Image (cartoon, coloured by chain):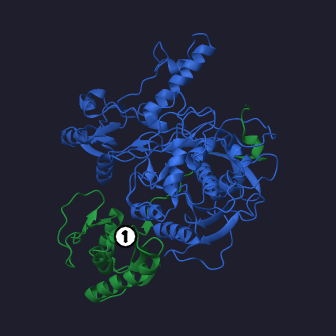
Amino acid sequence: MTANIQEQLRATGIAQVIVVLKAALAPAATAGLSLTKSVPSPLPKSAAAGLDKYFTASKLSQDSELAQALTRKARREKAAQKGTTRVGLKVMASATGRVSAPKVRYFDHLGLLFGTVDRAGFKRLRADRRVHSVSGALEISLIRPVMVKSATATEPVTWGLDRLGIPDLWDKGFTGKGVLVGHLDTGVDGKHPALKTAIGAFAEFDLMGRPVPNSEPHDTDQHGTHTAGTIAGRKVGVTAFGVAPDALLASAIVIEGGNVVARILAGMDWVVGQGARVLSMSLGLRGYREDFLPVVQVLRARNVLPVFAVGNEGPGTSRSPGNYVEALSVGACDEDDHVASFSSSQRFRRRDNPLVPDLVAPGVNVVSSVPGGGYAQMSGTSMATPHIAGLAALLFQAKPTATADEVEAAIFASCERPNGMAEERGNRGIPNGPKALASLTGTAAPATATGTAKTPKKQRAGSGR
Amino acid sequence: MALAAATEYGEEKEANPEPHGSNAMPHAKVDPELLRQLEHAAASDAPVGAVFCLRPAPSQKFIPPDEAEPLVRRILQRVEHEVGSAPEQLNVLKNLGSFVVSAGAPFVKKLLDQAEIASATANQQSEDPRIRPVESKRVRNPGQGRRKGN
């Protein structure tokens, strides 16, 4: 666990830790205990007095994200109830409705402290004689309530496609035709009405990463059919939900039957061999891991645009390979242009592309296909990622000679960060299809173009065709 | 740990002279999980599965697919000669310049020392890499997901 903290400190300069006090491990006093009071007393906060100074207040913690969400909720309720704040929120909310996040949390029944440290704080904590151990914190994601949706089945497109301006690109004739998109996931239901003509190639692999002969398209879960539908689902009923409805998928099962790295790499290798221009991958390992770095660099060098989900563990977290400089990493936003509370974001100690995700895309209440011919609404950065992969497919159709870097740069140039969206959470903001097309093809930008300043990721030495 | 030429993720070491004459090549980045599995396998004699990424030459952006397999064969033959055993299974991912082996711990350890290796990862990981949706709900049709009009 200490190795994990060191890795996080090297990559980001901070790490979330759990501190166990020595006093917490002392045998509980039994004197005075009775059948009616058999629970030992909490360890007084004085046992941890002064230790809080070793922690750092991070604006990018899950606590601060929760505090911001509670602040918004408190203010909304305050306005709605004409000054009456609910009792549960009153404890934490100030007169202005602002809810503050604690720098460090103390769990008195366990004798544990939980918070964020920098390298110096970590050293001092480990040296403090009251501290028994300092270990890496487990990743915890917020559990969101399930929302109630209205049943309006007459919309021409899903909200995500609408938000990205995708129908405008279709109107110009760009539907992904002729573009192959790599899709590495849990598989895809090849019999789904929306996908049966979308699968250009399919594969699954054994433990050594060798293709399984005569494999037919199928999904070992629901995840893959959902993400595939967002990339290239064909319109079956009233509402269109696939960003690139004429694109083809090179889809492979890579996360089935054990956590086997060879399968993922074999999938990447196969996708390159199939001639895909974009790779959509809604998977990753928590934290910063260099396992996939050389191969993602190869993808870039071979002119494949890697579009990866950043993770669902909230602020101050990210997953590899989505957090590499070389990846186009995608976070999730909702229909009100807020970054989803679960969407990961993290700043790294590196010159190029220090902030992930690169952008955010529709990832809350996303409706797409699921195995068996049905549909489901899901939320996650896994749902945002295929929106951007699909957009990239439309852009590659518009300019087949474009490099992966050029398409990425066009997407970045089209991004706009809505008012109130923190850069640390949403980075460049939300892309816009028509503006990305204009940027890529050099045509006039749409009249609605009002984007904020965009920063190219970096000039990659290894990029090219 | 007898993995002198390998560097665990994140370690910042001065490069030692490589075993094959080049002292310009940086060390391979090695997944700590692979090192753990190698230590464990040393006692049990069980094969270890590992994924290796090759280092392109300084003049190359990537290793051309038709060069990847011959290069892997040369490296494996060299290691086989030094260790006296061969890998049980091999799969070359030529488009990525990578390969997967299942071999005894001494063989995999020696592979880590080779100058052509950029990184090595345990094939079997403990963590599930899938990013699961935070919520999921069946709907009758795609139009049901839209919560508000515009």
The residue depicted at 62 percent of the width and 80 percent of the height is: A213
The residue depicted at 75 percent of the width and 55 percent of the height is: A234
The residue depicted at 40 percent of the width and 84 percent of the height is: B70
Q: Is residue A78 left or right of residue A239?
A: left
Identify the residue under disc 1: B60
- Judging depth in this view, the residue of A329 and A316 nearest the camera is A329
Q: Which chain is green?
A: B
Residue B43 in sight from this viewpoint: no
Where residue A274 appears, as percent x and y from the top left, is 59, 71
Above or below for A254 versus A413:
below
- Judging depth in this view, the residue of A80 and A340 nearest the camera is A340
Residue A232 in sight from this viewpoint: yes
Tag 1: residue type?
Gln
Q: Read off the chain for label 1.
A: B
Q: Is residue A318 left or right of residue A247?
A: left
Q: Which chain is blue?
A: A
Task: State the SS at label 1.
Answer: loop
Where residue A378 appears, as percent x and y from the top left, is 64, 46
- Judging depth in this view, the residue of A164 and A94 nearest the camera is A164
- Judging depth in this view, the residue of B96 and A47 nearest the camera is B96
Q: Is residue A14 left or right of residue A180?
A: left
Above or below for B85 versus A60:
below
